[in-house]
Amino acid sequence: MTQQSIEQLSINSIRTLSLDAVQAANSGHPGLPLGAAPMAYVLWTKFLKHNPKNPKWFNRDRFVLSAGHGSMLLYSLLHLTGYESMPMEEIKNFRQWESKTPGHPENHITEGVEVTTGPLGQGFANGVGMALAAKHFAAVFNREEFKVIDNYVYAICSDGDLMEGVSYESASIAGHLKLGNLIYLFDDNEITIDGGTSLTFTEDRTKRFEACGWHVQLVEDGNDLVAIESAIREAQNVTDKPSIIRVKTVIGYGMPNEGTSDAHSDAIGDVRVAETKRNLGWDEDKKFYVPDEVYAHFKESTDRGAAAESDWSHLVEAYAAKFADEGNSFKLIMNNELPADWEDSLPSFEDVEAKATRVYSGEVINAIAAKIPNLLGGSADLAVSNKTDIKSSVPFQSDSFEGRNIYYGVREHAMGSLMNGMALYGGTIPFAGTFLTFSDYMRPAIRLAALSELQTIYVFTHDSIGLGEDGPTHQSVEHVTALRAIPHLTVVRPCDAHEVREAYRIAIKNQNSPTALALSRQKVKVIDRDKFADASGTSKGAYTLAEASTGEPTLIIVATGAEVGLALETREELESENIPTRVVSMPCRELFYRQDESYQQEVLPDNIGARLVIEAGVRLGWEGVIGKDGDAITVDKFGASAPADVVFEHYGFTVENAVAKAKNLIS
């Protein structure tokens, strides 16, 4: 068989596997796999450095299918290249219950899937984060004769990806940082679900990316394998710019309705499947069929990947022998392990003055940064306010990739998505800050971090009406509750320095899900932990901070964040009037509800119905704690522009109001 014929046979195997799977599921997106199969074939057989026998090999190239709706393209490639996670049974089980082939790729379900994609633009931005992480590790660990990190990040993206604003945000920062290890293939088929891109997307994409500092090429024919290969090789030679290759394709290539929006999605029916196979020169009676010579052909490329990993493993051992400290650190990072004594670096916060919890957060970050070198920070142009700078490091820039302070600019959405990419690359613990209100701008990325089981840490400051004079546009009211609504996201609102320290202990240990910290702008007193309970209960989400003087409370006050101080003052007043009052600090509802029933009853026994919740946010979500006989001091309208203490007083966050509500509960 000639080289040309085996290549075409391999490409059509990708196409027909995808087509059969979509038809069997009676749903899916056949258009992209049929149109983009040639570029994917070239990339995976001639360039992509990976080893299906070890999908997590650290120095592998990363491939991102940003256009995740075309998932069968990726699943077909994983099957043909021999990933154990993708036998033919899984291809046949496309989009079915508990399959390894869900409708859109999910990294935590299927080995070989690097990124959970589907929401357009996210994969594009995740790839930038991956490339950023690779550049950082290369700068920190590589030596002239030991290039232990030298991989590329590749992606296939679509018109829809480029329309989403997050792709522009991340393209802008990638160009600024000169990420030459980033190579994207743009499936430029000019079709969306609603019709041609002429309906809405007519800008010059080439000029857009050139303006962002990217190297741009055009391949006029998406079936021209030589031109595609040549373009990728040229992109590899451009070391100071990210690259995007516009590949003009025909969506649904070979289908009767190729090149139209009708070819984008949905099963096309048995009759048209047969016609498509005939158009591709394929036996229409064979379903889920791959010729033996195609398997053998793909194995040649994966054998090269296995050999490359073997060579790299020897290189790492030689590197560790010559550079012992760097080698040990590198191996910890590769294995996602923490230094054994990192917790010793957490500050004790003894005899410290009242400060905002955002300030305590900055102190914790700088205390642990030396012990955890793969902790990479950043902010969306608010580092001074968020206190996220690692003072011992320098900015991450194109001439200082070793820097640990990433300046994302006013790009909250890209920031969240790049953090996901960094976490997905492996080895990094990314954290970044912005005002809590602007978590709305990055919510899609936070949700995907939770879905993808990623360790990302969000430092959200200015967490309530305590922001004061900036007014309701910047004062968070509903945001903590909105974050709590995201499954698998741990939201911690600490009340003082000690709980901030414990919040970071939680976040650093929380290796399989993201953590969001809600931190104050206004100062809070450091609670006397000799007088009241220590902060170790933070790890359980809620704990009895101050017990009733009698040991049998008549009333329980539950508070979070800065309002815990108000709860303690209220308790003092109530106790002076012989009303036994317990104060429960509940920095993290999610963690509390994960505790066993006996602990929950110990903290919030059912037989005490007089409960007062105090939180400077919406009441929604607190109903289970408040119960049928309780009450709350919350904020169920937007804030106002005035000094923080004035706003709090007008919104009822005073000892007088809290005492009055408490007495009403027990009257």
Image: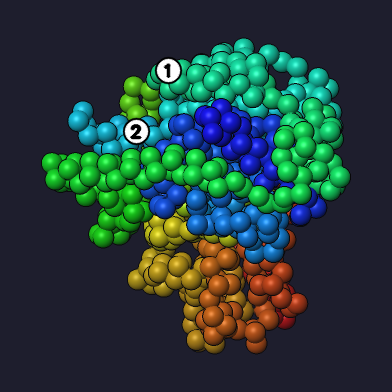
SS at mark 2? loop
Count neighbours of disc 1 (C-alpha within 10 A) and say few if under 14, some if 14 to 19, many if 20 or more: some
Viewer-nearest residue: 473 or 335:
335
Q: Is residue 57 visible?
A: yes
Which residue does the image show at 74% across and 78% down from the upper left?
Answer: 629
Decide if residue 234 is on the left or right side of residue 326: right
Q: Can you give x and y, in whole percent of width and height, for residue 68 in the image?
A: 65, 42
Q: Which residue, as the protein is rendered here, is positioned at the far left?
A: 322
Pick whichever of labels 1 and 2 is earlier in the sequence. 2
Q: Which amino acid type is shown beneath numbered disc 2?
A: Asp
Q: Which amino acid type is shown beneath numbered disc 1?
A: Val
Name the residue beneath numbered marker 2: 150
Q: Can you give x and y, in whole percent of width and height, for residue 380 in the image?
A: 52, 33
In the rendered image, which quarter is residue 19 located in?
A: top right
SS at mark 1? loop
Which residue does the image show at 56% across and 27% down from the upper left?
Answer: 4
Name the residue beneath numbered marker 1: 238
Decide if residue 264 is on the left or right side of residue 8: right
Label drawn at residue 435: none
Quadrant location, the N terminus: top right
Which residue does the image show at 41% across and 46% down from the upper left?
Answer: 51
Viewer-nearest residue: 298 or 508:
298
